[in-house]
Amino acid sequence: MGNRVCKKILYYIDVICISPLAVFSGEEGTTDNSILYDYDGIPFVSGTTLAGAFRNYYNLEKNKDSLFGFSDSDNGVGRMSSVYISDMRFESCNVNVLIRNGVELNDNKAVVTKGKYDFEAIEPGNKGKFIIELVIRESDEQRENIWEKQIIQILSALDTNQIRIGAHKSRGYGKLRIDAIRKNVYTRHNILEYKNAYDYDKYILLPDIKEELLQDILTKYVKIKIPLKMNGGLSIREYSAKKKLPDFVQLTVHENGTDIPVIPGTSIAGAIRHRVVEILTELGISCIEYIINSIFGYVDGTEAHISNVIFDECKIIGAKKLILSRNAISRFESATKDGALYREMAYYGGNCIMTIYVNKEIYVKSSSEVNINISDYVIGFILIALKDLQNGYLSIGGQTSIGRGIFEEDGSIVITEGICSEEEYISNCIKLLEEI
């Protein structure tokens, strides 16, 4: 007899985007990077994207047996996946899509030639749903409980933002919150009901078991929260192409009918990275580029490494909008350039809480070719950079030479999941010299 299916366990998950979500199609459309659209022109997230993020959470090798199957071509063995993940569809056909602009800067904060790009992302607040189906065959019955626990861990990690979806996830994108989880089990006793298993009108009647199902899990990151007060204005430009709007506007997200100014994770990461490079240089640490790449990630042709530090997008609450008219001045003549009058919209004042996650396991090779974990030292260097930010010595965004992007302290730095205090992290980071 064959290896028959004896049970199917389906989890129905409702989610909400709490940060922009960018899952690119790999093709150019209205922007350099367009998101995925179905035949009807409605955005969606493919099941392969979800499955890849879930599998990556466990760092599973392709030739090792697991819930997601495996393939060991060297030994001629393998097994298909026991879990099937649907596409993530959104509740409304009118999914709000935003367009973000980006520009590549060099170490001197100058624009790299042809470094301008733009891309699409799904706005925060959009609600979606997807289904996880676990198939239990006769040979797998002893592993059913283990696999169910792994799925629960995956959902718990998704709800706590340890799993993020799509592109730019180390810069604040791809955060989802689980709103509800429903579950149904199909066996030979109710197999006829399986024909309605994917019918939304049917499974929405099942009870929500999110609270009893999700569990506390060990986090892979040390979380740092920095309360800040904006001292002056902020200028992270978004280029406007609409009538009656200024030529340049501050980057915002639209929530509950209100535009809220934000600092993207890319801007925060760029400022902190630049200052950490200066700190390492001042300390006389060798192989700085190698260390920085290990911390903040890199892309070099076909080689790349994801960042070990995550910078969340930062919302500024209570800021006031101000539209300014300005002239561009010729630096040689100190006179107004012809036709160079423009308007910009900036935000002034307000408070924010900046959130940074540092991987607990950041490994680099020492001079003796031994892998060492430098995570605690990285936290120390980042805290030093944050102190500069709190004291107004480090600014974020554009037009910093005219006082934009300057912050001041608005409370104590909070470190969770760490093993040291703020002072201990800072004082111990100098030990990196000895390790390297």
Image: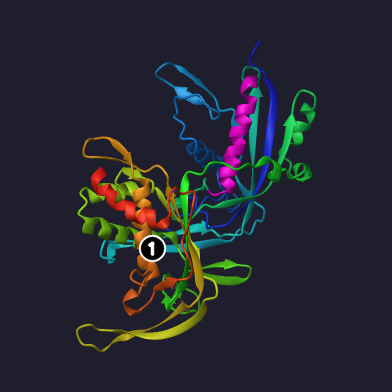
Q: Considering only vertical position in the picture, is 329 above or below 90?
A: below
Q: Considering only vertical position in the picture, is 36 above or below 265?
A: above
Task: Please name the residue that numbered disc 1 is placed on.
Answer: 386
Does residue 28 appear anywhere in the picture?
Answer: no
How many neighbours does mark 1 have within 10 angstroms: few (below 14), some (14-19), or many (20 or more)? many
Q: Is residue 425 left or right of residue 183?
A: left
Predominant secondary structure, magenta span: helix
Give the position of the C terminus as an image quadrant. top left
Magenta segment: 141-161
Q: Secondary structure at mark 1?
A: helix
Q: Which residue is the extreme one toward the bottom?
A: 335
Residue 144 drawn in magenta = yes
Query: Residue 28: x percent and y percent?
Result: 43, 54
Query: Residue 319: x percent and y percent?
Result: 52, 76
Q: Is residue 278 left or right of residue 384?
A: left
Tell me the amino acid under the disc marked 1: Leu
Q: Residue visible at 58% across and 33% down? A: 150
Query: Residue 216: x percent and y percent?
Result: 60, 43
Give the position of the N terminus as an image quadrant. top right
Query: Residue 7: x percent and y percent?
Result: 70, 25
Instruction: Kindly indicate the quadrant of the structure image that contains residue 197.
Output: top right
Residue 421 drawn in magenta = no
Q: Is residue 225 left or right of residue 177?
A: left
Observer-nearest of 58 and 174: 58
Disc count in the image?
A: 1
Instruction: Kindly indicate the quadrant of the structure image that contains residue 108.
Output: bottom left
